Amino acid sequence: MWAKVIYYIAESVLVGYTIAQYDYGSQAGPIGSVPGDLEAGSWRKFVMHYENTISGDAADDQYFSIDVVNITNGAVDGTWTDEDYDYVMQTLAGMCNALNSDVASYLTFKQVLAYIRAFNPYSNSKPFADSGPPDRILAANAPGAGQPNVAPQACTTITELTPSPKHWGRMYSPTLGVTSYGSSGRLSTATIDAIANNVHDRYETLMSAQYFPVVPTTQSDKQPARTLQTVTGVQVDDVPDVIRRRRHKNTLSKVTLPLATAQQQPASE
């Protein structure tokens, strides 16, 4: 059972019912809380980049992300060494390589990008500090192995469970190949088992080394609440999802057929 932990910045208001759902809570500093250290209390957002090699249009590339906090002695550690980055990025790259058996072959896993993320203090209405360019980039070149005859907006949802169901996390897999589906149009049991176990095992690997996948939350009960909730489980079901923003951005062919009858003048009375 994964620990139920919440990290929150100063001045956060957590009602008794909310905090009672967690095994442990700890305060983390917003950006600038430690003089001269803009990374205090920060975590990292790891973005997985898949290139659409058939389209050749960068606008058709696909991305999904995972937020990870580095914990030292029970507290958020905003300092990330080369060894920290290597461990997490290699673990996530391994997850993508395993996922590729179901990913459509017109997609190639190309990069893991790491961005520094931090909360602003509540005095700033904008919850997140600007992340700037990637702090690290890990190159990859691993094509998907799934049959490609499927629209790019078709995928599955990987849900990150937290103690608060209203604040579960969600990420969308890259487009899955045709062989991931059963005759009913649902994802096959083998596919969802493989995806769920792959993500679960990589999260276990990270957590065993004190790198915890988290879900950033900016609101609770309609009130500002800048918190990080640790992921307590993952869930994948057999209902395919659709991400409209992944539709091809440009058409390669188009058919327009005018209706001759519509161009005739109406008969006079």
Image: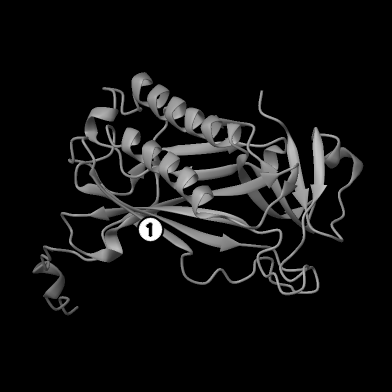
* Residue 68 placement (x, y as % from top left): 58, 48
Percent across and percent down for residue 64 are: 43, 50
Question: Relative to residue 260, is residue 195 drawn left or right?
Answer: right
Can residue 57 be seen here? The reply is yes
Name the residue beneath numbered marker 1. 245
Can you say whether 100 is above or below 128 in the image? above
The kind of residue tagged 1 is Arg
Relative to 262, 5 lies left or right: right
Which residue is most to the top? 189
Q: What residue occupies the far right of the structure in this picture? A: 16
Task: Name the image quarter holding the C terminus.
Answer: bottom left
Please name the residue shown 67% across and 37% down the image.
162
Looking at the image, can residue 236 be seen?
Answer: no
Q: Position of residue 77 (x, y in %)?
A: 68, 52
Of residues 73 and 104, the one drawn nearer to the viewer in this rendering = 73
Q: Residues within 10 Å of mark 1 (few under 14, many from 20)?
A: few
**Regarding mark 1 in the picture, which secondary structure is present there?**
helix
Q: What residue sits 38% from the left and 43% below the top?
A: 93
Rendered-image quadrant of the N terminus: top right
Percent coordinates x, y for residue 20 in the rendering: 86, 35
The residue depicted at 17 percent of the width and 76 percent of the height is: 266
Q: Is residue 208 above or below residue 154?
A: above
Seen from the viewer's position, the closer of residues 127 and 167 is 127
Determine whether, in the image, residue 83 is placed left or right of residue 79: left
